Every structure is written in C-alpha cells, then in structure tokens.
Amino acid sequence: MKQQPATLGRFVVRVLIWLPAVFLVWYGLARWLNIPVAYALQTLYDEFFPGLVRDVLFLPSGLRIDSNLGGGESVAVNPLIYGYGFPMVLALTLAGFGEFSRRLFMSAVGVLLYMPVQIYGSYFDGLRKLEFDLASALGGSLFALEWKREALVLAYQIGFLILPGVTAILIWVILNADSLKVLAKKE
C-alpha cells in the first residue's frame, strides 16, 4: 500500500483526531500528574518563603495549600489550569510524521519538559492567593514593597496566560524538527 504524502492538511486532521483522545487520557491521569506538582510546590515554598506554608496536600480535585497565616488558613490550586499544554504537546507530536515509536518517545520527553510550566503556574497561583486572598484579608502582606506585589501579579499572569500555550508549541517545534521539515518540503 502506497503511503499518503505528508501535507499540512493531513497533519491538521491528524492533530484534530489525536487531540480529543489525548485530552481524555490527560484528564483521566490528572490526579496522578498533580503529585509531582505538589511535591515541587512544597519544596519551592519551603525554600523561598520558609514558614509560610505548612503543607501542600494532594487532593483528587487539585491541591490545597495549608498556610501558617491566621489560624492556618488554606487556599486551593488547580494545576490543570496550567497543564493544558500536555495534551497539546502530545497531540502535535503523535500527529507528526515518521516512526510511531519515535513519536511516542518524543511525546514522553515533551511531557517531562512541560512539567515546569505547570509547576510555575501553580506556584504563582498559590502565592497570589496567599498574598491577595489571605494576607490582605488578615490585614497584612507577604511583601513589604508594592513593586514585589506587582511582580507577583505579573509572574502569575505569565504563568496563566502565556506559558502554557506558547511553551507547548515551542516544545513541539524543538522536539519535532523532522516533522516540520516534512511539512515545509516543497514538492
């Protein structure tokens, strides 16, 4: 059987076929993908804000950050909000051209490379909620200078609005240069 030529149209169709499937798998595994995020957040909060966070608890619906503010108030963080690039990386990579085993391997590498984006977004979301929801409600602030609060908001917005989508595309481009060459090739 003759193999169909690799075209941009065929690639887009393949992405659209893969995307719902990998999205369902990602959503089904999300509670397990939250485990490394919880451990990373605990480590980061302990390192950069010692004594602020008592515990980061893994819950099926996300994470709960127990603070030492007030009477031990908590905030909830949903890492899925920052992890939607996982299915994007997987769908783009699996829809590519070449050997399936290589595409599968590159998908796994892509997921590992994407994990810091989810950690970054979750970290600054938690810190934003601790500052603006808890500390402000208790009449205080985690930051003595206003510019630090503004920097926190900027870091949160970058992690929420920019990094998840842009990083997914960048990871795909870097790991799948062969598919890009096939798509760009003029016949």
Image: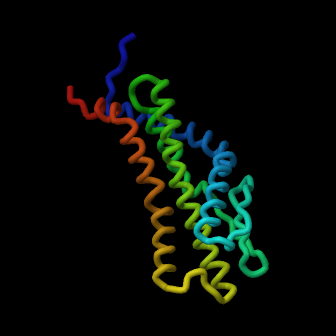
Q: Is residue 32 above or below residue 163?
A: above
When asked about the image quadrant of residue 25, the answer is top right
Q: In this view, does 32 lie above or below 140?
A: above
Residue at the location (69% across, 73% down)? 51
For the view shown, which residue lies furthest in the left direction? 187
Q: Is residue 123 left or right of residue 94?
A: right
Q: In this view, does 181 lie to the left or right of 131?
A: left
For the view shown, which residue lies furthest in the top direction? 1
When asked about the image quadrant of residue 70, the answer is bottom right
For the view shown, which residue lies furthest in the right direction? 71
Q: Is residue 27 above or below residue 99?
A: below
Query: x, y percentage for residue 77?
Result: 65, 63
Query: x, y percentage for residue 94?
Result: 47, 33
Q: In this view, does 120 lie to the left or right of 12?
A: right
Give the number of marks: 0
Q: In this view, does 73 lie above or below 167?
A: below
Residue at the location (33% across, 27% down)? 6
Query: x, y percentage for residue 87?
Result: 53, 43
When asked about the image quadrant of residue 93, the answer is top left
Residue at the location (38% across, 33% down)? 11
- Tell me the quarter of the image containing the C terminus: top left
